Amino acid sequence: MKKACIVHGWGGFTHEGWYPWLHVELEKLGYMVESPSMPDTDYPRIEAWVGHLAKIIGEVDTEYVLIGHSIGCQTILRYLETLPPDKTVAQVILVAPWLGLTPETLDENESEEIARPWIDTPIHFEKIKTHCNNFVCIFSDNDPFVPLTDAGIFKEKLGAKIITENAQGHFTESDGITELPIVLEHVKK
């Protein structure tokens, strides 16, 4: 059976923005969909988020599609690092993925203290690539938090297909984003 998991971002909830819309659309395509509420969403910690995602997913298989937003993207990548060598997923779609933030890009609800472990803990891209060979990264040309220069890193390190959307901000409800057809389009491919 086809399965999908949508991982929200820092301070996010499963019932906001484009997540509910995508959940319903994936179900229409025959996917069994998980949209977990991540623990302590305002103070995300790597171990807690990756552990929670692993528990939600359970036994991963080659039919799984993982979709993340913002820090949910890092959660997915760090989860893939933990998989046994013989486990793979069908596709990973990362919306507004980031690797490094500066104090200038953190808003009033996000602190450098919380972000620092996510920034400083290395991501092992070579290991991640052994668990998926279909990565799509979606950026916005006016994202206040994620620089477009990060796109090149994802392309180089993961062989990701890079998509840059026009004027979508950080792809949040406050940016007016309640549907994200580009994600659905790439799941269908």
Image (tube, rainbow, N blue to C red):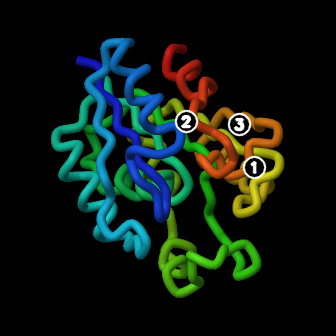
| Quadrant of the rendering where the C terminus is positioned | top right
Question: Looking at the rendered structure, which numbered label has been put on residue 49?
Answer: none
Q: Is residue 22 visible?
A: yes
* x then y, percent, for residue 179: 58, 30
Q: Would residue 78 be found to the left or right of residue 159 on screen?
A: left
Residue that label 2 marks: 135
For mark 2, give the secondary structure: strand
Residue that label 3 marks: 162
**Dots 3 and 1: beta carbons under 8 Å?**
no
Q: Quadrant of residue 146?
A: bottom right
Task: Return the residue nearer the eye: 57 or 134.
Answer: 57
Q: Would residue 169 be found to the left or right of residue 77 on screen?
A: right
Residue that label 1 marks: 152
* x then y, percent, for residue 84: 25, 48
Rendered position, 5 above or below 105: above
Of circles 3 and 1, the one toward us is 3
